[in-house]
Amino acid sequence: MATEQASGKDGLTKARRDIVALGIAAAAIILFVGTGSAVLPKIVEQWSSGTSGGPNMLLTNALLLNIALIIFGWRRYRELRGEIETRRVAENRARELAEIDALTGCYNRRSITSETDRAIARAHSNGKAIVFIMIDLDNFKQINDLNGHQAGDEVLVRAAERMSTLLPDEAILARLGGDEFAIVLSYDANSPDHVEQFVARLIDSMSTPMTIRNQQVQVTMSIGVASGMSGRHGELSEVDAQALLHQADIAMYHAKRQGKNRYFWFEKTMESELRLRNQLESGIRHGIERGEFVPYYEQQVDISTGELKGFEMLARWNSPHLGMVNPEVFIPVAEEVGVIGDLSEGLIKQAFHDALEWDPALTLSVNISPVQLRDPWFAQKILKLMLECKFPPHRLDIEITESCLHDNIGVVRTMITSLKNQGVNISLDDFGTGYSSLTQLRTLPFDRIKIDRSFVAELTGVDASSRIVEAIVSLGTGLDLPITAEGIEDDKILETLKALGQMKGQGYHYGRPESAGAVRERLAAAGLLLEGKPKAPAARDQSAPGKNRKSA
Ligand code: C2E
Ligand code: CA
Ligand code: CA
């Protein structure tokens, strides 16, 4: 910045000198014409006649001075041209640095707005519309974390290359920062399908994995498309680049939330959806600070004897604005905004305190998100919590879902092993809904598998049977892994399961998840509460205890 200003000043003095030099040269030429026409004929005449007494000495000197000035002017002109050329190259370079992304060579965030506005003007004069396509690579952070930043950079360069080969004439490709790209192109507003075909080709272009430093990397993208209309058809409103960028961004986030690796046209309703989502995000952040997240507990029972074996902790958000919120609403948001670790640890700590009041034979199961398992310190954090709360490891059961296994099996294995070495039990949750292979089941040291409630629900019909439940039960027997069936809603399901063999069960048949206070009442009535222990703070018991309860 500073050097730019200095060179600007320098340029100004040079330019002033150039004007003076130009004036001198012009005057010299005029004088040359004047004096030359008077003096030169006389010199020629003297040479040809051989006589002495040539032209006036003063005029001769003036002529010589004229010639010197013309030479000076010519040299200055040459210098000037050289300077202009150097300055032009420097200016081009500066513009490039300001407008072009150094890594990928695409336009950057600063230049995309002006380029888009120019494209809009061009398209209008040709009777065409403009579409702004916002592209975000999915799970790029993970690629970076697992393979390093240099590999991440290579992925960005390759992705840009793949996209640029598909660009039609006059289309603009920009990298807006991080793993975010944008493409701007003109199209016939009556044929939005052309845009869709282009976007489909973009998504398809990423389907072949990239080989980066001998590693196969699979990249997908979430895409938002905006043309100034709501949806793919409709009234084309007057929009500028900023508005299009904003709309495409909203549509892109929508694509992310709908499961990534897909595209959406911007629609007006997405704006209010986004507002809600932002409210949810800040509500969750504040909720964690204010301790609004509370553990609820679901009974886990031996299905043949009906004996209570322990509880699964299920998170609830007691929001002052939204009421009691279920985890399916806030867990994915907490995962996405990176607060799931804090949220979960806070809950586990509360659960340890609660469970320490229960009969020590009762176990405590907690659910762990795949995002938490990516934290290399996860096992240490859990062990530290147990130590702090003096919670015996053998009473803790950590439930991880199958989706944890495809993220990074090596890290997960280390984590499971170090927790198991401390005596913690590990269950594979929602079994059957993911893609864990038999090899993973055999080589990862799980203590239990939980049959997902969607399969258990199939046992309700008149001649209820579920091949899947039967298969999982026999798999468990074969691998010597005990089983828990979730989602036992009625007697019918319970009887069918009992016929399949020994297992634990849980579900509405035994009772809905309930607050710490309700659990304490239940246990007190059953003589399963340790006496003489301090009670958990009353502020945490917000729910009416004992709703929908059935005894085990
Ligand atoms: P999950 O681990 O499969 O937990 C069981 C879910 O099934 C609970 O839903 C429970 O209320 C519900 N449920 C129990 N019995 C029945 C039944 O008989 N029929 C039916 N239809 N449903 C039953 P909830 O509490 O809404 O939790 C949903 C999911 O949220 C849990 O599924 C778990 O994956 C996740 N979750 C809950 N708490 C936490 C947490 O602290 N951390 C993480 N990462 N995930 C959590
Ligand atoms: Ca679970
Ligand atoms: Ca489950």
Image (cartoon, rainbow, N blue to C red):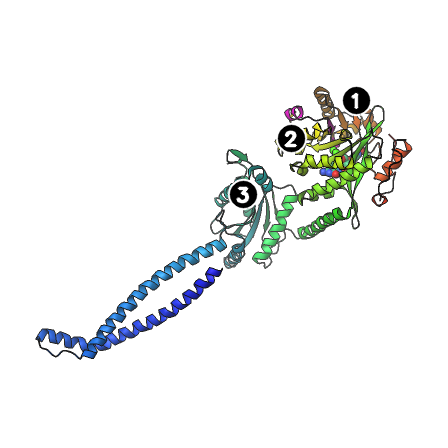
In the figure, residue 329 lies in which quadrant? top right
Residue carrying label 2:
414
What residue sits right under mark 1 in the picture? 502
Residue 97 in percent (x, y) is at: 48, 54
Label 1 and label 2: CA atoms lie apart by: 31 Å
The CA span between labels 3 and 2 is: 38 Å
* Drawn side of residue 442 relative to residue 241, left or right: right
Q: Nearer the viewer, residue 42 or 277?
A: 42
Residues at discs 1 and 2 in contact (Cβ within 8 Å): no
Q: Nearer the viewer, residue 426 or 389?
A: 389
What label sits on residue 202 in the rendered view? Answer: 3
306 or 60, which is in the foreground? 60
Q: Is residue 504 left or right of residue 405?
A: right
| Label 1 beta carbon less than 8 Å to ligand 3 | no
Relative placement, left or right, of 524 versus 145 is right
Q: Is residue 168 above or below residue 429?
A: below
Query: Dividing the picture into quarters, in which one does residue 33 lie?
Result: bottom left
Can residue 255 be seen here?
A: yes
Q: Nearer the viewer, mark 1 or mark 2?
A: 2
Residue at point 47%, 50% (across, down): 169
Q: Amino acid at mark 3?
A: Leu
The residue positioned 53% from the left and 45% from the top of the image is 198
Quadrant of the image containing the C terminus: top right
Q: Is residue 29 above or below residue 120?
A: below
**Among the two numbered marks 3 and 1 on one chain, the one whose residue lies closer to the N terminus:** 3
Q: Position of residue 301 (x, y in %)?
A: 82, 28
Q: Which residues fall within the magenta stretch?
A: 438-454
Mark 1 Cα shell of 10 Å, populated few (<14), some (14-19), many (≥20): some
Residue type at numbered disc 2: Thr
What secondary structure is found at the residue carrying circle 1? Answer: loop
Residue 272 image point, x, y percent: 69, 52
